[in-house]
Image (cartoon, grey):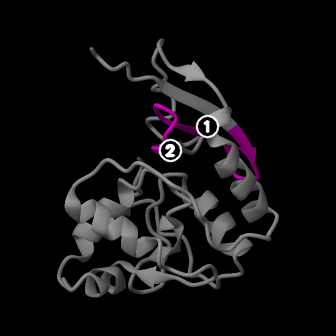
């Protein structure tokens, strides 16, 4: 007997734009911003179904209303062990606070891995829920964000997080 994998998705209209939410067999695997390069990777066999994501949508609505500070969801993350360890560390960054890439690397016990942390941060499949927007450059500058730096600024402002300036155009802007 073969099992059938079904990818479901829905869109959520948020203050930072229309978010694409989806996963396989009703599991939560990704949130994509309008600016994401992978935003339009909808396959013909994907099924639009908001049902599996009702709880996420309720929590996102509460977050954007300023009522929710910690997401409590089950998710299915695909990535390397290192990526998963970074994402677990990102999930520990409290609402209203930031960490540098170096801070995250140190928390993982690998202080020389700030660039690898940046790459894992860039691959985060669940932005906002796993708050990669709370990671900034060592000098406080806002660098790289898959949803675009304007979205990162909006999210930091929403959480009343003081922040530095956006990086200049010559710096790498991550896009997942």
Residue at (41, 47) in percent of width and height? 176
Callout 2: few (<14), some (14-19), or many (20+) C-alpha neighbours within 10 Å?
many
Callout 1: few (<14), some (14-19), or many (20+) C-alpha neighbours within 10 Å?
some
Residue 13: in magenta span: yes
Asked if residue 152 is positioned above or below residue 98 in the image, the reply reads above
- Image quadrant where residue 87 sits: bottom left
- Residue position marked by numbered label 2 in the rendering: 28
**Where does the image place residue 13, in percent across and percent down from the top left?**
75, 42
Asked if residue 61 is positioned above or below residue 104 in the image, the reply reads above
Residue at (22, 64) in percent of width and height? 82
- Magenta region: which residues? 12-29
Q: Secondary structure at mark 1?
A: helix
Asked if residue 73 is positioned above or below residue 45 in the image, the reply reads below
- Residue position marked by numbered label 1 in the rendering: 52
Which sits in the foreground, 142 or 18? 18
Which sits in the foreground, 75 or 100? 75
């Amino acid at each position: 007997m073969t099992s059938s994998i079904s990818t479901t998705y829905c869109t959520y209209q948020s203050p930072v734009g229309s978010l694409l939410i989806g996963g396989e067999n009703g599991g939560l695997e990704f949130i994509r911003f309008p600016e994401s390069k992978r935003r339009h990777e909808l396959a013909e066999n994907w099924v639009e179904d908001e049902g599996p994501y009702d709880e996420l949508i309720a929590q996102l609505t509460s977050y954007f209303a300023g009522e929710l500070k910690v997401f409590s969801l089950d998710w299915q993350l695909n990535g390397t062990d290192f990526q998963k360890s970074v994402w677990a560390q990102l999930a520990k960054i409290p609402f209203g606070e930031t960490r540098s890439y170096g801070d995250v690397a140190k928390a993982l016990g690998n202080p020389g891995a700030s660039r690898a942390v940046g790459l894992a941060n860039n691959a985060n499949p669940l932005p906002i829920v796993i708050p990669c927007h709370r990671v900034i450059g060592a000098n406080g500058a806002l660098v790289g964000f898959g949803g675009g730096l304007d979205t990162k600024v909006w999210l930091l402002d929403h959480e009343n997080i003081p922040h530095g300036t956006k990086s200049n155009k010559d710096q790498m802007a991550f896009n997942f």
